[in-house]
Image (cartoon, coloured by chain):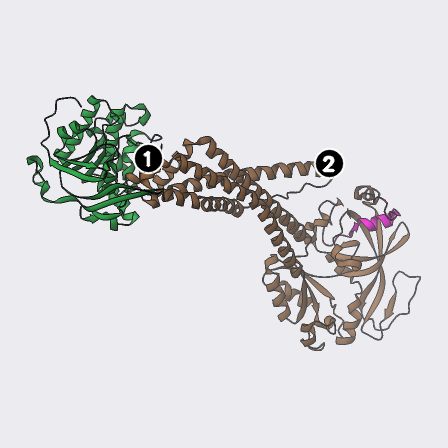
Amino acid sequence: MKLPDLTELALRNLRESLLRNSLTTVGISVGVASLVAMLSLGIGLQQMASRRLMKSGLFDTVVVTSRREMRGMGREEERNGPTAGESRVLDEASRVEIEHLPNVSEAYPDIRFQAELRFEDKPHLTIISALPESAQSNDAFEGMQGSFFTSDTAPEVVLQKSFAEELLGKTPALGAPEPGAAELAKPLLGKELTLVYAQRASSPAQPTPLRPDTDSKDSDAAGASYSVISREQKLKIVGVSDLDPESMRGPSRAKVFLPLRLAEGLHVMQPTDLREISRAGSDHPVYSSISVRVKNPSQVQVVEDAIKKMGFTTFSILDASRGLRQFFGVLYSFLGIFGSLALMVASIGIVNTLVMAILERRREIGIMKAIGASDGDVKKLFFAEAGAMGILGGLVGVALGWAIGQIINFGTNVYLKRQSLPAEHFWAVPWWLVGGAILFSAGVSLVSGLYPAGRAAKLDPVQALRYE
Amino acid sequence: MTTVPAVSAALSTVAIHSDNLCRHYRMGETLIRAVDGVSLEVRSGEFVALLGSSGSGKSSMLNLIAGLDSPTSGSVVVQDRDLAKLSREELAKYRLHVVGMVFQSFNLIASMTVAENVELPLRFAEVERSKRDNMAREALERVGLRTRMGHRPSQLSGGEQQRAALARALINRPQLLLADEPTGNLDSRTGTEIMEMVQQFNRDLGMTIVMVTHERALAERYAQRMIFLADGRLIDDRANIPQPSGGGQS
């Protein structure tokens, strides 16, 4: 029998026992809905986690250091790598070369230094970090108070909430509720801070003795060819960030952020300067590390390999992302198994419905066989009925699962809003899940139809025709 | 074996040949000999009536010829096919293309319209839909049911249902029509109409007819040959000259 005829007959037969077949199909739908709902939750959570992590800039960033910095740290490649004399210096030329590699969106030096910030004549020692304009999309700055830097060279500063607390003398006691970012930002935004820092300058002809009463202090660095000058820079507070953009850096994380070009222009003395000068005798700035942003996280490994070939050491959080994928893989499996259980229960309903149909349609099967239907025709007919219930149940189930997801998402967002938290979309039904769920439902239904279809096909036509 | 002049040309070949055909059932300790060593030959185009009382084995014999049942021993050869040697798939094809069947209880599928019932064998034969529609219309026209195509069997009278069953049996243009008590559920006038139709198929199309009946008068009126069965055995096989139509069913 041809497929259109088979489908037509199957649908006709399903319509004949509408209530029973509808209830069976509803059973399948509930099973598919639970499967879709479970997996959508898993996928949504993974997407949300990935989104968050991507926004953190951790997964598309490769940190590049010179092998000179890494030798003796125990890593195999560093032990076997070139010697300090052979390895390349991480300077501006290297940065430009890295930035021009394929799949690299930007490469910028990690400018990080400890300095004093004066606010209302009170000194505060802290770690300061420079941020490129692209950091604006960082998750930590999404809901910040105030705004991001107006330009890459603007004398502006963004504070992390804990530093804002320090400036205002509002550091909460252990266990006490923390003040909100909005509350902290109000008295600080638009105010001025003074950054006191050590500037590296080209070597003067004669070293000048340190004069504490002047605002410019030069010092001779062990006879090397540069000087260190104490400088001040006025900065306007433009933003207070609630989240910590450098939370992954541990104790070395900065709490105050400057625009990258501004920070570069300050020529702040870096810890590596002295070492590089003594090694190479050059007075060009040498970076301790460079952050490389990759266009797509999937290309991190390729970029890392290319940079390693250039003679540098790289580090990315790719391994952590692999772990994350593994975790979600396990989560999917568990959610999928629990979701499938309902579908398995529904499959028993299909077997029951079809076995009942065989009993009811025993005579009909006999008639069909008497007028020329083969065992295969009868089997295919029951298969088609099972498959039709499966596909229909799958379609309704996917819609139901999607609707459940939307309702839960909506309800959760209402709750989040009441808690003054940003809305989240943690439910995702990708197309592959829609197709997969329908196919899975049809597959389970066909497997359920195996026994009834086989039984119907083997019916003795003489016995079946006698059946009343 | 007697030949009838109207179909003498067709009778030259053997349509059905059974040799010591047996169909035995075991019910508990009892062995039931439904068909017990029946040997017969039916020639192409012959109209044969299988007669006997209830339980004589005539329906079992018909089922064996139809390929619905398999013999316990012996053989039945129809149109050069030894049915005992055919696979289930081959038997289905044989029933689809060689045999048309009509039953006492009509056996139309209640959920289908008359037209759908009639064209059902064509679906199994994978005939194109457009061709199928024309063939069903033609077959229903032949039995006078053209106007009832869209009706369900429950909306038809017994006679109309049997005519629809006849149309279904003829749709694949089989060489052999097997009828199991075709008038058993009909009043005499309607029964006559049906029998006239069957006789017409035999005469006009040269179709071989094997009809099971327990009504001797009916057999005498239409069949060219009467085979009597009792307790599964063939007890008599005689030629008959059909009576001209015009009377009611006795």
The residue at 89%/49% (across/down) is: A120
Residue of label 1: A466
Task: Indicate the colour of chain B.
Answer: green
When the figure is inspected, residue A125 is found, relative to residue A185, above or below; the finding is: below
Q: Amino acid at mark 2?
A: Arg
| A264 with respect to B22 (left or right) | right
The disc numbered 1 marks a residue on which chain? A
Please tell me whether residue A107 belongs to the stretch shown in magenta. no
Q: Which mark is residue A418?
A: 2
When the figure is inspected, residue A391 is found, relative to residue A232, above or below; the finding is: above
Residue B153 x/y as whole percent: 31, 27
Front-most of residues B124 and B74: B74
Q: Amino acid at mark 1?
A: Arg
Asked whether residue B206 is in view, the answer is no
Please tell me whether residue A152 belongs to the stretch shown in magenta. yes
When the figure is inspected, residue A272 is found, relative to residue B80, above or below; the finding is: below
Residue at the front extreme? B29
- In which quadrant is the C terminus of chain A drawn? top left
Q: Which chain is brown?
A: A
Q: Does the CB distance between marks 2 and 1 fall below 8 Å?
A: no
The residue at 74%/39% (across/down) is: A420
Label 2 sits on a secondary structure element that is: helix
Residue B50, picture quadrant: top left
The disc numbered 2 marks a residue on which chain? A
Disc with the residue nearer the chain's start (2 vs 1)? 2
Residue B107 x/y as whole percent: 30, 32
Front-most of residues A79 and B96: B96
The residue segment tinted magenta is: A150-178
Quote the CA–CA distance across marks 2 and 1. 70 Å
